[in-house]
Image: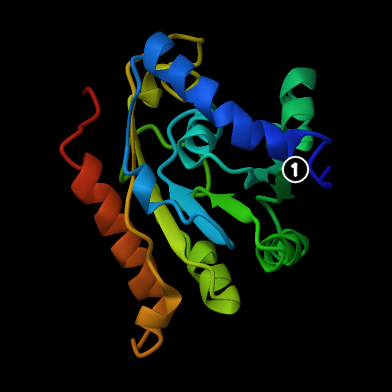
Amino acid sequence: MTGAPGRGARGFARVGSGPVGVAMRVLMDADLSGREHVPSAGPFIVTANHLSLMDPVLVSAAVGRLVRFLALDELFGQAAVLDRLMLYFGAVAIPRERAPLGAMKKALAILEDDDVLGIFPEGARARFWGERPIKRGAAWLSIATGAPIVPCSVIGTEATMSLTEPGIRVPAVKLAVHPPLHPGSYMDREDPLRSMMDDWAKTIDDAIGHWKREE
């Protein structure tokens, strides 16, 4: 279920980020900040907290480059439109129930081609930030390729296409891109993977930790 991005996908990501960003601000009352932290060239791994099926679209618009996300294979086959979108933008299917060796191989190839990889370190949508343990795959790929991790925090998308609000709504959202985490800064740590992801989690928590789920 994974292949190269569809024809025009890369150009849409570059040209479309402008109008998509405008639409986000107007229609969704979206607040975007930190675009200056996005590397203008070369590979990187954009990593965001994950509340909604809308998150990949919004994070891609915030980055302004084609982002090839790792997506759980169970998302494929649920809706034809969603399948076409994920395949068009070159999503990489990752299995939940077995070792994702094939997906990690594709992810390495994406970064080695100087492209942008998207990962949600929580592994799947969460009902609220802090519910799920943080996985280390992003740090492993970063250290293996030298590509930095670019954290992106998301608030507000829990109100649409989420585990608690599955319907389609138009909420106010806030996205912020944060300074990159460079793998070379972690190589002297006792556990580089854990240290890198601990710093990622702290970055996200500092940005959205004040947001609490409704009881």
Going by the image, does 86 lie left or right of 20? Answer: right
* Quadrant of the image occupied by residue 91: top right
Going by the image, does 121 lie left or right of 99? Answer: left
- Type of residue at label 1? Gly
Q: Residue furthest left?
A: 210
Work out whether 118 lies above or below 78: below
Image spot of residue 154 (x, y percent): 36, 36
Mark 1 residue crowding within 10 angstroms, few (<14) / some (14–19) / many (20+) = many
Q: Measuring 60% from the left and 75% from the top, which residue is drawn there?
A: 145
Work out whether 21 lies above or below 204: above
Going by the image, does 110 lie left or right of 16? Answer: right
Viewer-closest of 86 and 184: 184
Give the quarter of the figure containing the C terminus.
top left
Going by the image, does 200 lie left or right of 10? Answer: left
Image spot of residue 164 (x, y percent): 41, 21
Q: Measuring 51% from the left and 26% from the top, which residue is drawn there?
A: 18
Q: Which residue is mark 1?
A: 90
Give the quarter of the figure containing the N terminus.
top right
Q: Measuring 42% from the left and 81% from the top, which residue is drawn there?
A: 184
